[in-house]
Image (tube, helix red, strand yellow):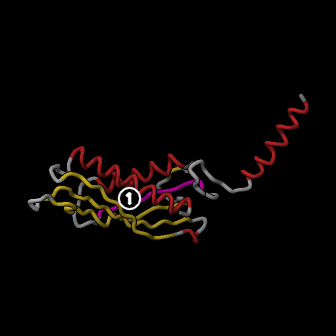
Amino acid sequence: MAKLKLKIIVFVAPLFLLLSSCGVYSLSGADIGNAKTFQVNYFRNNADIVEPGIDRTFTLELQDLIQSQTSLGLTNQNGDLVYEGEITRYYIAPMTATADSQAAQNRLTIAINVRFYNNLDPEKDFEQRFSHYYDYPATQQLVGGTLDTALEEIYSKITQEIFNKSLTGW
């Protein structure tokens, strides 16, 4: 029995030391350093086309992603990590045409300018534009379920890119 305990200690101790020496990481690969809190300021919609509610939805999606993938606490002020910015583009364009020159598919593109401040390590601060699109049949209106699906896919991609840029160094 003593030999078994010794073998476990010999195996587990180096593994524990290796993992603990790598800094503070979450299971998602995020390097939060000594940060304890984050704040996501309201992302205003400054696009030429204003779709009501997309600014609030984006702000909440970014908050939810960071909360679900890190142990950081959400705060309204004085966060260790701060995200802010604005929606700069909300644009619908025809993408493909049918034989009689009608649009067969449309594309919604959303671009968001993000400013990230790491108040504990200002060298990690950045400002960058993130953009993604969603294609949908031209026979559908961009309302209701189609709009919800488009926003969900676009915001999922953009928020993950922001997360990766700010907390994983990708």
Q: Residue furthest right?
A: 2
Q: Residue at x 52, y 56 (%)?
A: 38
Residue 56: x and y, percent? 33, 53
Q: How many marks?
A: 1
Q: Residue at x 85, y 38 (%)?
A: 7
Can you identify the residue that label 1 sits on?
42
Is 41 a magenta residue?
yes
The front one of 104 and 87 is: 104
Q: Residues within 10 Å of mark 1 (few under 14, many from 20)?
A: some
Residue 69: x and y, percent? 53, 48
Left or right: residue 168 compared with residue 44:
right
Q: Residue furthest top?
A: 1
Residue 124: x and y, percent? 56, 68
Residue 53: x and y, percent? 28, 53
Q: Secondary structure at mark 1?
A: loop
Left or right: residue 53 compared with residue 163:
left
Q: Residue at x 52, y 62 (%)?
A: 166
Vertical relation: 104 (above or below) 118: above
Report the quarter where the N terminus lies.
top right
Residue 80 in sight in this render: no
The front one of 54 and 165 is: 165
Q: Quadrant of residue 101?
A: bottom left
Q: Quadrant of residue 96?
A: bottom left
Residue interval drawn in magenta: 35-45
Vertical relation: 137 (above or below) 1: below
Q: Amino acid at mark 1?
A: Tyr
